[in-house]
Image (cartoon, rainbow, N blue to C red):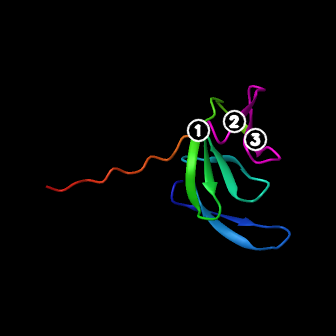
Amino acid sequence: MAGKLFKFTDIESTKSRQIPNAITGFLKCCAVSPDGKYYAAAGEDGRVSILDLETLKMIGYFHSNVSVILAIDFSPDGKQLLISGADGSIRIWNLFTNLMPIPTPTPILKP
C-alpha cells in the first residue's frame, strides 16, 4: 500500500486534500490531531505512523505492542495518542517521548 494517496475532506470547509499512505499493509484506523497539524495512521502490523499535515512528511512512528488495533485518537491537547486493542487494552503514547524518528538515508559514496 505504500505510495498510494488517501483523500480527506474537511466537512465544515468541504476542502479536500490528498496525503501519502504512511503504513504498510492495510489501514486499520486513523485520526487527525485536534489542531489539525498531525495525522496518525495505524496499520495491520501494529505500527502507528505520524505525519505532519503541513509538509505531508512522516515525522515518526512507533510500534503499539497491540496485536490488533481497533481505534486510535489524539488526546484533547494533541500530545498523546490513545490506542484501543482487540484484547481490551487501552494504551497511551506520549508523542514527544515515544516517537521513533524516521532514519535519514545514508548517502552512498562513490570512489
For image coordinates 71% across by 64% down, the residue present is 8
Decide: few, some or many residues near mark 3? Use Cα within 10 Å; few <14, some 14-19, many ≥20.
some
The segment highlighted magenta reads: 71-98
Give x and y (percent) for residue 43: 61, 44
Q: Can residue 110 be seen here?
A: yes
Q: Can residue 45 be seen here?
A: no
Res. 92 image quadrant:
top right
Give x and y (percent) for residue 29: 71, 47
Mark 2 is on which residue type? Answer: Trp
Mark 3 is on which residue type? Answer: Ala
Distance Cα–Cα, label 1 vs label 3: 15 Å
Q: Helix or strand or loop: what does disc 2 sit on?
A: strand
Distance Cα–Cα, label 3 vs label 2: 13 Å
Is the residue 65 above or below the residue 34 in the image?
A: above
Instruction: Name the residue tied to disc 3.
Output: 71
Q: Nearer the viewer, mark 1 or mark 3?
A: 1
